[in-house]
Amino acid sequence: MNATSEKLVIGVDLGGTHMAAGLIDGRLRVLSAVEQKTVKSSQKALLESIAAAARKLLERAPAPVAAAGFGIPSMIDQLHGRAVMSVNIPLAGVDFVDYMKDELGLPVFIDNDANVAALAELRAGAAQRASQALMITVGTGIGGGIIINGEIYRGATGSAAELGHIVIDVNGPPCQGACPNNGCFETMASGTALARYARELAASQPDSALGRALAAGKAPDGALLSKLARQGDGLSLQVMEKIGFYIGAGVTSLVNVFNPEVFVLGGGIMEAGDMIMKPAIKYLRERGLAPNRDIVKVVRAMFGPEAGMIGAACLALDNINASRH
């Protein structure tokens, strides 16, 4: 085993609904993991819960841990290590790096959660060897990562690639959380949007399989709708195809702007596979501009739900390696 593979780091992926933290080695193997719901009662409670999860992994580590990386769904000020604002969680104006350094006694590195997911796919996943690539992570909201010339593009202060907040429909529903816009990509195509569409259709057809499931108290999430659609429920399939349509609209706009070689679709919603992928790709091939629409390869994330956690570990490994050269 070489020196790089012997290093242990903590990678934390903080999402709008769930948090996953892993003890990860230099070969990107997950040695131990902690998963829990994201605490949203207050900023203080959220920060404490993140630090507690990381400490659990420190206690389990068979050797010293070199650093911790965090992917958080926030606008990031990389220069000062701050989470400036967040749409779906209570983090704003907090010196995140300093806080976690004090709590963990480790070097700490942060980035946007979708950036670190893109980093994982670039290092060892679906965007490996790509020079120009894009990624979106579809969950509670939609995050984005941009790869230009083989590197993550972060913008002037580190807060670039809020791809979920391109506007798809200026007359659409208000965006969620702290975003002041209407009809954002994530408002039209995220897990939150899927739940909204499901409730609307179930109310119109309460005797459908979807209507009965929601009446019984089941959550209108991707797992339920995927299951019902595969069992032949047309209403659930209609919701999935609608999400795919709007993902296609957002992807097409981004492909027209960036002309990537690869577009990676990640996040929990993409576990639905072709029910979303097919309408999204159909939209792109029909409405994208040539030659961009024809050359781009649209693929699912290789790491799936672990992409953010592994990418946060990549962030930590990259930084500790750079500091030693």
Image: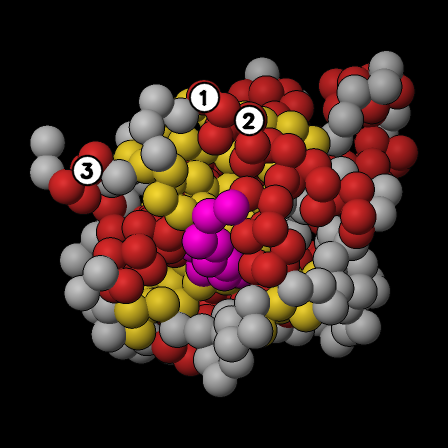
Task: Provide the residue span drawn in magenta.
Answer: 105-117
Kindly report the distance in space between the C-alpha atoms of the residues bearing marks 3 and 1. Answer: 18 Å
Q: Residue at x 45, y 42 (%)?
A: 11
Proximity of marks 3 and 2: CB atoms separated by less than 8 Å: no
Look at mark 3 in the image and give the residue it sits on.
5
Look at mark 1 in the image and give the residue it sits on.
60
Please, is residue 143 above or below residue 165 in the view? Answer: above
Q: Along the polypeptide, which appears first: circle 3 or circle 1?
A: 3
Mark 1, residues whose alpha carbon is within 10 Å: few (<14), some, or many (≥20)? few
Q: Secondary structure at mark 1?
A: helix
Residue 76 lies, in percent from the top left, at 58, 68
Look at mark 2 in the image and give the residue it sits on.
56
Residue 116 counted in the magenta span: yes
Q: Secondary structure at mark 3?
A: helix
Q: Residue furthest left?
A: 2
Proximity of marks 2 and 1: CB atoms separated by less than 8 Å: yes
Residue 281 counted in the magenta span: no
Residue 131 lies, in percent from the top left, at 21, 68
Residue 231 lies, in percent from the top left, at 58, 16
Kindly report the distance in space between the C-alpha atoms of the residues bearing marks 2 and 1. Answer: 7 Å
Please, is residue 21 above or below residue 215 in the view? Answer: below
Q: Quadrant of residue 85?
A: bottom right
